[in-house]
Image: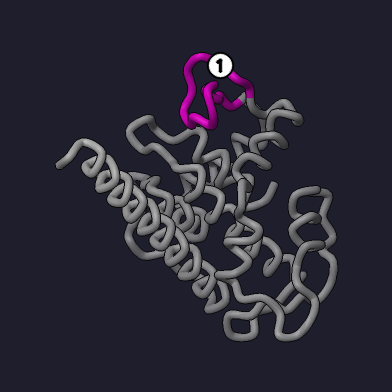
Amino acid sequence: MTTAKDLFIIAVDAEPSCPVGQGDLSLALAGAEVIDLLRAEALMLAGDRMVPTRQPTTDDPLLTEAASSLARQVPYERVEDWLWRRGRDLSATYLAAFEEAGLLTRQRRGRLSLGAARMALADSPARRRAMNRWAADEPVLAALAAVVGIHDVHSTDSPGAVDDTVTTVLAAVDEAVLELEAVRQRRAFENAAFANIWRGA
């Protein structure tokens, strides 16, 4: 399993009081993929530019797909640009992959609502691994989860001991999620103003 899949599991399993937006989760999943590719030595960062090095040795099709979609020409792609490009509807991609693998089922009651149905995780080694990593307060997973609004009672505000490249990715994810929230607020304000015009306010 990958950090991205572990994050998806944590998001699905989050308490109902911590709803996770699909857009926020998609951006965080894209960031998790970058971190997985860094750890697999499939890319390196030159500042905030993602420089591919080799195809990762992995049996995870989503991570292979992510590696294959890296920009391979100078000046390469900025982490933030990758998050927006790769992150488009990425939570839905993970949803479909989990359903196909039998790791997720549509039920009346669940944790994360993706569409009309609610989703529930099947008991599996993948889920147990993710939950063990979550219980251990693994710094990268905890930091990514915090960005999308999931906070463990044991977590702190600090992402813990991570290297500079991971810190760069986490900062880019945080900025992208904040930018997405700003867009939501602006649209809500514009819609409210438009509604007031029609009501004669």
79 to 199, vertically: above or below: below
164 to 147, vertically: above or below: below
Residue 169 occupies which quadrant of the picture? bottom right
x and y percent of residue 156 in the render?
A: 33, 57
x 66%, y 41%: residue: 94
73 to 93, vertically: above or below: below
Direction from residue 33 to residue 72 in the image, left or right: right
- In the rendered view, how is the structure colored? one colour
x and y percent of residue 130 in the render?
A: 58, 42
Q: Nearer the viewer, residue 18 or 92?
A: 92
Identify the magenta region: 105-121
SS of the residue under disc 1: strand
Direction from residue 111 to residue 123 in the image, left or right: right
Location of mark 1 (residue): 107
Direction from residue 91 to residue 139 in the image, left or right: left
Residue 71 occupies which quadrant of the picture? bottom right
